[in-house]
Image (spheres, grey):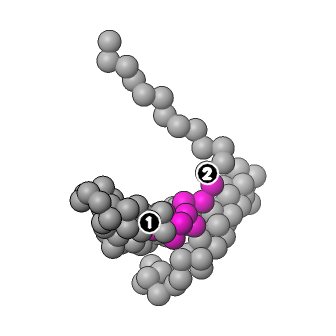
């Protein structure tokens, strides 16, 4: 369980790489379980939780970056224009935190008729 304590020390790019590697490990573990080659099925649970820890750390950093930028449009005039510029810069900074989610289905919204 010592792995979760080193996550805050890693950089953002390193966390994204670690997330990809951990997801690959999880896929391989699931494949091994399906073929009967996995002896310790608890590894799947541990790996799934590690993926969740990495996602949590990335989300914490994303929220921290968003809290540092001022709200755009809060005041009229020049300050709103400056805020819009800061929003654009902050969005560019956090783009790497949201990797492309290929193959992920979105839930359909229910209509209240």
Left or right: 74 in relation to 42? left
User: Crowding near pointer 1: few (<14 within 10 Å), some, many (20+)?
Assistant: few
Q: Between marks 2 and 1, how big is the CA–CA gap?
A: 27 Å
Q: Is residue 102 magenta?
A: no
- The secondary structure that dominates the magenta segment is helix
Q: Is residue 19 above or below residue 111?
A: below
User: Crowding near pointer 2: few (<14 within 10 Å), some, many (20+)?
Assistant: few
| Nearest the eye: 101 or 41 | 101
Q: Position of residue 110 (x, y in %)?
A: 39, 23
Left or right: 37 in relation to 5? right
Judge whether residue 81 can be spotted in this image.
yes
Which numbered dot is residue 54?
none
Q: Is residue 95 magenta?
A: yes
Disc 2 or 1, which lies upstream in sequence?
1
Left or right: 76 in relation to 36? left
Q: Position of residue 56 (x, y in %)?
A: 42, 66
Image quadrant for the N terminus? bottom left
Residue labelled with disc 2: 101
| Nearest the eye: 102 or 62 | 62
Image quadrant for the C terminus? top left
Quarter of the image for residue 16 reads bottom right
Q: Position of residue 26 (x, y in %)?
A: 63, 61
Q: Residue at x 29, y 60 (%)?
A: 77
| Nearest the eye: 111 or 7 | 111
Judge whether residue 50 can be spotted in this image.
no
Q: Which residues are magenta?
A: 90-100
Q: What is the secondary structure assignment of the residue under circle 1?
A: helix
Residue labelled with disc 1: 85
Quarter of the image for residue 60 reads bottom left
Q: What is the secondary structure assignment of the residue under circle 2?
A: loop
Q: Position of residue 28 (x, y in %)?
A: 71, 61
């Amino acid at each position: 369980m010592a792995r979760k304590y080193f996550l805050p020390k890693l950089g953002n790019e390193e966390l994204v790489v670690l997330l990809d590697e951990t997801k690959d490990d999880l896929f391989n573990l699931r494949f091994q379980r399906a073929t009967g080659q996995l002896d310790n099925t608890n590894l799947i649970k541990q790996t799934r939780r590690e993926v969740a820890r990495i996602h949590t750390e990335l989300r914490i950093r994303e929220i921290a970056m968003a809290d540092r930028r001022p709200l755009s449009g809060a005041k009229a005039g020049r300050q709103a224009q400056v805020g819009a510029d800061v929003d654009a810069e902050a969005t560019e900074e956090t783009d790497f935190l949201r990797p492309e989610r290929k193959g992920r289905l979105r839930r359909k919204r229910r209509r209240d008729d």
